[in-house]
């Protein structure tokens, strides 16, 4: 685990991937946080414990009326590299209940998509598995909108858990989408807990997914609903959020009455104190579950006892949840195991590589989009290429190809002058050296990036078919509909001439499959399309 990072009165513990692997084999991690008038700025020291989280409850934590179990950003029902799995989470909750605790399982957004299974079932499998696992409460993340608001509403209807959504409004009803509660007050023994739920409102959710939905500013929406929690007698206030960590910090700075943020969006572990609030993010894919026991003392101090629980193979699967998962996995198998082609070389789909440089997998996807659209050029936001691993040489099944692009994005064909192509490329590399999903993977062109130059003027020497890009010449360009609609800050495309719009475009996943099937043998290389200096 990384050493605690300390900065100006807040404590942050970020467990990176290497630390997570260690956590899988190590005891759980525990820490207590009080919320009096001051917050400690000393380094956090975790106490190791080897016994089960559900056994030998002693001391102040044993008096807590509620035990929150936190998940966020869960895209897989089953373990990944030996960690995670919703059937294990179900068992963990049951073990705590059997030990006399009152577990309350909360999911802070992002679970309907993206994944191989979600590309087929559109999140139905996640709702069914979470129903079986005993999820109690959820809020929305940006990926809940991947299939549009009508599919989201259908998934919400299938849910047996409570949705709390304070800032997402169905314009047909002027009420929270899907019949969600705008806020909730729930009693746990002597303790009344008030909940709000907040979803980000950034361009990660494109307007085409929001046909009759309006997402309000989350900070302002919190201010509208927090007074109601106090009026209804809440002793403790919990914000269940799917916001960037910086926005979570802004939230608790503005509203010091918030005691706990159960958050999502970042895919790594974060535990921080800000003002009087504890902010927790439990990683992704249920590899770890954050256990947070909450109590309020007579003198007013809110106690929060934090423990990080790795979901390892030592936790048996809950049979009922496992059966639900097995049924969906079985339905997938026959459709997705067909071999489409063969990779003769490893294909680099590691996110940190794709989002900072040319990779051979990025070239393959960009070539597929360009070939399908029949254009001179293709530009693909690297955040749309998933898997986050090197795909080994060998058979490429339909399952693998869907894993590479698990969204329902389609190809848009545009015509535009070269100056707009240049503007788009500059926009895509603006965040270097940071890895960002906007980084472009391209086909039909080459360019040089001077990362030391000011943002907006980093791209040099753009070549199309061996010739210098002409700023006023018109080029045909294929792009995903996500960036056509302004996703990842590609705002320049919306005003360009549309040759084939989203309503008529081919699915990108299908275009990839068609190219692989046509070539059969994939020998894609890094070709110097993008040179970094």
Image (spheres, helix red, strand yellow):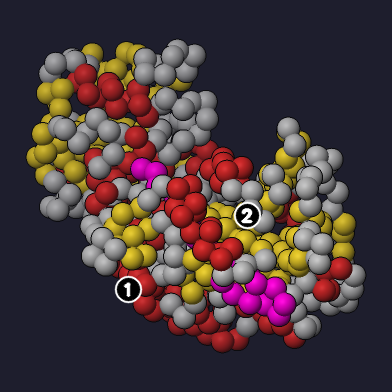
Q: Secondary structure at mark 1?
A: helix
Determine which of the numbered discs, if any, sits on residue 258 in the image.
2
Q: Secondary structure at mark 2?
A: loop
The residue segment tinted magenta is: 185-203
Q: In the picture shown, does residue 395 fall above or below 7? A: below
Asked if labels 1 and 2 touch by Cβ distance under 8 angstroms, the answer is no
Is residue 72 toward the left or the right of residue 142 in the image? right
Crowding around mark 2 (Cα neighbors within 10 Å: few <14, some 14 to 19, many 20+) is: many
Is residue 285 toward the left or the right of residue 112 in the image? right
| Count of marks, rendered view | 2
Q: Sequence-wise, which precedes: disc 2 or disc 1?
A: 1
Name the residue at 11% across, 38% down: 498
| Image coordinates for residue 406, horizontal then vertical, percent | 37, 57
Residue position marked by numbered label 1 in the rendering: 154
Would you identify the image quadrant in which residue 263 lies?
A: bottom right
Name the residue at 49% across, 66% down: 183
Is residue 350 toward the left or the right of residue 489 in the image? right
Magenta portion: prevailing SS class: strand
Name the residue at 47% across, 18% down: 451
Q: Residue furthest front?
A: 231
Q: In the picture shown, does residue 19 fall above or below 54? A: above
Who is closer to the viewer here, 331 or 421? 421
| Image coordinates for residue 156, horizontal then vertical, percent | 39, 73
Is residue 188 part of the magenta span, yes or no? yes
Q: Nearer the viewer, mark 2 or mark 1?
A: 2
| Image coordinates for residue 359, horizontal then vertical, percent | 43, 35
Q: Work out whether residue 61 can be spotted.
A: yes
Name the residue at 24% across, 25% down: 421
Q: Work out whether residue 326 can be spotted.
A: no
Alpha carbon distance from label 2 to label 1 = 31 Å
């Amino acid at each position: 685990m990384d050493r605690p990072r300390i900065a100006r009165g807040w404590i942050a513990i970020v467990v990176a991937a290497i630390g997570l692997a260690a956590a899988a084999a190590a005891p759980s991690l525990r820490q207590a946080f009080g919320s009096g008038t001051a917050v400690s700025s000393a380094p956090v020291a975790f106490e190791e414990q080897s016994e089960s989280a559900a056994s030998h409850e002693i001391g102040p934590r044993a008096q807590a009326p509620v035990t929150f179990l936190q998940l966020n950003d869960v895209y897989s029902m089953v373990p990944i590299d030996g960690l995670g799995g919703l059937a294990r989470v179900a068992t963990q909750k049951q073990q705590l209940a059997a030990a006399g605790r009152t577990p309350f399982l909360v999911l802070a957004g992002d679970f309907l998509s993206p994944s191989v299974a979600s590309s087929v079932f559109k999140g139905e499998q996640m709702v069914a598995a979470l129903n079986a696992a005993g999820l109690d409460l959820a809020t929305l993340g940006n990926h809940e909108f991947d299939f549009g608001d009508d599919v989201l509403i259908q998934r919400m209807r299938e849910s047996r858990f409570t949705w709390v959504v304070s800032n997402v409004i169905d314009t047909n009803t002027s009420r929270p989408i899907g019949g969600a509660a705008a806020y909730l007050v729930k009693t746990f023994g002597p303790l009344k807990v008030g909940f709000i739920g907040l979803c980000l409102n950034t361009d990660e959710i494109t307007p085409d997914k929001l046909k009759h939905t309006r997402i309000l500013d989350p900070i302002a929406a919190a201010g509208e609903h927090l007074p109601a929690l106090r009026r209804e007698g809440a002793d403790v206030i919990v914000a269940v959020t799917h916001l960037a960590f910086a926005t979570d910090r802004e939230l608790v700075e503005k509203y010091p009455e918030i005691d706990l943020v159960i958050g999502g969006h970042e895919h790594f572990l974060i535990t921080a104190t800000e003002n009087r609030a504890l902010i927790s993010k439990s990683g992704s894919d249920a590899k770890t579950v954050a256990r947070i026991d909450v109590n309020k003392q007579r003198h007013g101090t809110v106690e929060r006892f934090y423990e990080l629980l790795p979901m390892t193979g030592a936790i048996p699967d809950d049979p009922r949840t496992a059966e639900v998962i097995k049924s969906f996995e079985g339905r997938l198998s026959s459709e997705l195991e067909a071999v489409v082609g063969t990779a003769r070389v490893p294909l680099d789909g590691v996110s940190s590589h794709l989002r900072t440089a040319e990779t051979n997998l990025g070239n393959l996807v960009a070539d597929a989009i360009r070939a399908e659209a029949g254009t001179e050029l293709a530009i693909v936001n690297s955040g749309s290429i998933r898997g986050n691993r090197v795909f080994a040489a060998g058979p490429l099944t339909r399952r693998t190809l869907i894993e590479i692009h698990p969204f329902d994005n389609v190809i848009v064909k545009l015509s535009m002058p070269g100056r707009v192509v240049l503007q788009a490329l500059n926009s895509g590399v603006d965040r270097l050296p940071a890895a960002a999903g906007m980084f472009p993977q391209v086909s039909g062109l080459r360019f040089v990036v001077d990362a030391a130059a000011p943002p907006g003027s980093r791209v040099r020497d753009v070549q199309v078919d061996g010739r210098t890009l002409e700023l006023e010449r018109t080029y045909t360009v294929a792009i995903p509909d996500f960036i056509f609609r302004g996703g990842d800050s590609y705002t320049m495309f919306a005003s360009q001439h549309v040759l084939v719009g989203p309503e008529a475009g081919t699915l990108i996943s299908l275009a990839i499959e068609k190219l692989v099937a046509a070539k059969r043998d994939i020998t894609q290389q890094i070709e110097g399309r993008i040179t970094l200096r």
